[in-house]
Amino acid sequence: MSLGSDADLELRVKKATERISENMHIIANEPSLAFYRLQEHVRKALTPMVDRRVEVNKLRQELQGRCYDIDYAVGAIKTMNKAEESFKNIQDILKNAIFLKQQLKYEESRRKKPESSSVYKRLSAHITLDLPELPELSDVVRETANRVESMMSKATH
């Protein structure tokens, strides 16, 4: 039995050494397999990650530019609020100037022509409007006034 048990023992030792050798081979090659998997992952993930980073940097620059624009606009609006009193003064001065011009026009028309018998002229001399002089409208008003006067004089004669 010693021969049979030696052969059996030898077979078991051979199988055990093969298993140990195989395990040693797997353990020895495991780091390279891990590095291969890491390299594969980095190769697949790096390009999209770099593209995203470039896109994020571009968006950050655009956002920063828009923030500068908003700051500038807010500053302009604050400055405009400070100008409100100046605009009110200008408006008052313009109203006063229009009123004075109308008074001068009225006085000038009184000096040039004696008191007219036209009802329209007498009425229009007393009407004061707070409208600015518009060259386009003054011709139309003058023409309309002439027509009304001619119609009134034809009606009276």
Image (cartoon, grey):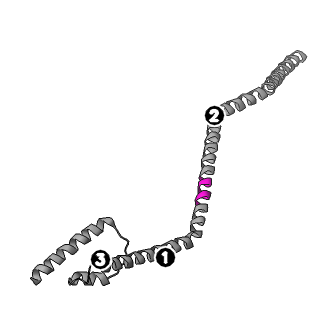
* Residue displayed at 15% across by 80% down: 152
- Rendered position, 52 above or below 26: below
| Callout 1 secondary element | helix
Mark 3 surroundings: few (<14), some (14-19) or many (≥20) residues within 10 A? few
**Residue 9 occupies quadrant:** top right
Mark 2 surroundings: few (<14), some (14-19) or many (≥20) residues within 10 A? few
The disc at residue 137 is: none
- Rendered position, 89 above or below 115: above
* Residue displayed at 25% across by 68% down: 140
From the image, tell me which residue sits under label 3.
112
From the image, tell me which residue sits under label 1.
92
Residue extent of the magenta highlight: 66-73
Q: In this rendering, which labeled residue sits more in front, label 1 or label 3?
A: 3
Q: Position of residue 7 (x, y in %)?
A: 85, 16
* In this picture, residue 113 sits left or right of residue 150: right
Dots 1 and 3: beta carbons under 8 Å?
no
Q: Report the amino acid beneath label 1.
A: Asp
**Residue 39 occupies quadrant:** top right
* In this picture, residue 51 sits left or right of residue 125: right
Q: Position of residue 147 (x, y in %)?
A: 17, 73
The disc at residue 47 is: 2
Q: Position of residue 146 (x, y in %)?
A: 20, 73
Question: In which quadrant of the rendered image does the C terminus lie?
Answer: bottom left
Q: In this rendering, which labeled residue sits more in front, label 2 or label 1?
A: 1
Mark 1 surroundings: few (<14), some (14-19) or many (≥20) residues within 10 A? few
Question: In which quadrant of the rendered image does the N terminus lie?
Answer: top right
Q: Earlier in the sequence, mark 1 or mark 3?
A: 1
Q: Report the amino acid beneath label 2.
A: Thr
Q: In this rendering, which labeled residue sits more in front, label 2 or label 3?
A: 3
